Image (cartoon, rainbow, N blue to C red):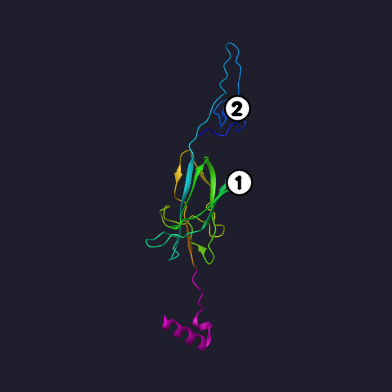
Amino acid sequence: MLHIDRQGGDDALDSDADTTTGQTALTTLTSGENDVTWDGGLFDYASLGDYVWEDLNADGIQDVGEPGLANVTVNLLDGSGNVVDSTLTDGLGNYLFSDLIPGQYEVEFELLTGYVFSPLNIGGDPLLDSDANLLTGRTGLLTLASGQIDLSWDAGMTVPAAAIPEPATLGLLGAALLALRKRRR
């Protein structure tokens, strides 16, 4: 792929080729003239994606047996925070953004109803942790190089544990009911 033409303020460093035809504008050189500002930049498209999973133990790490979550909306934002693409996770929790122009991006995961995000960047393996900010669902800016395929941007989601009050705050009758409820499980 050709770079977007006429980017930046330095004619000696930008791509002059038309992205459709691959041709530059017609120019005329006089005898002995040397114009080295005509060029064409090339790049390969990049891709990014990975997985959204149900973090059953809420530890922020993908564990064996924790299922992927289907139909999670995943947004791709440009370096300025504008949504440039959106997709849904498949039945296994996978998503992919492909044919991306190299540059800065951010991934934004939208929570499913009843879930919260898992702890961020836990453990030593970036391929198994959750990358979604607990409040915004965003990963932070990342940079994709020409031809790069980055399949490391995950989000764990967990159902928050119901808050069970301490028996001392329930009174005698409340504590007895709580104990009875636990026995029936």
Give percent across and percent down for residue 96.
Answer: 48, 49
Task: Please identify the dominant SS of the magenta region.
Answer: helix
Left or right: 15 with respect to 62?
A: right
Q: Is 87 in front, or is 177?
A: 87
Q: Is 138 in front, or is 70?
A: 70
Give percent across and percent down for residue 178.
Answer: 48, 83
Identity, as a three-letter code, of the amino acid under mark 1: Ser
Is the residue marked by circle 2 packed among few (<14), some (14-19), or many (20+) residues within 10 Å?
A: some
Q: Is 43 in front, or is 141?
A: 43
Q: Residue furthest bottom?
A: 173
Element under disc 1: loop
Separation of marks 1 and 2 at Cα, in angstroms:
25 Å
Which span of residues is magenta-colored?
Answer: 160-185
Give percent across and percent down for residue 37.
Answer: 57, 23
Is 131 located above or below residue 24 in the figure? below
Is 113 located above or below residue 85 in the figure? below
Which numbered disc covers residue 80? 1
Which numbered disc covers residue 136? none
The residue singled out by tag 2 in the image is 11
Residue at 49% in and 82% down: 167
Q: How many callouts does the rendering have?
A: 2
Is the residue marked by circle 1 packed among few (<14), some (14-19), or many (20+) residues within 10 Å?
A: few
Is 31 located above or below residue 132 in the figure? above
Looking at the figure, which quarter contains the C terminus?
A: bottom left
Element under disc 2: loop
Is 161 located above or below residue 96 in the figure? below
Q: Is residue 88 visible?
A: yes
Give percent across and percent down for residue 158.
Answer: 48, 65
Q: Is residue 110 magenta?
A: no
**Mark before the other along the chain sequence, 1 or 2:** 2
Q: Is residue 140 visible?
A: no
Residue at 51% in and 86% down: 174
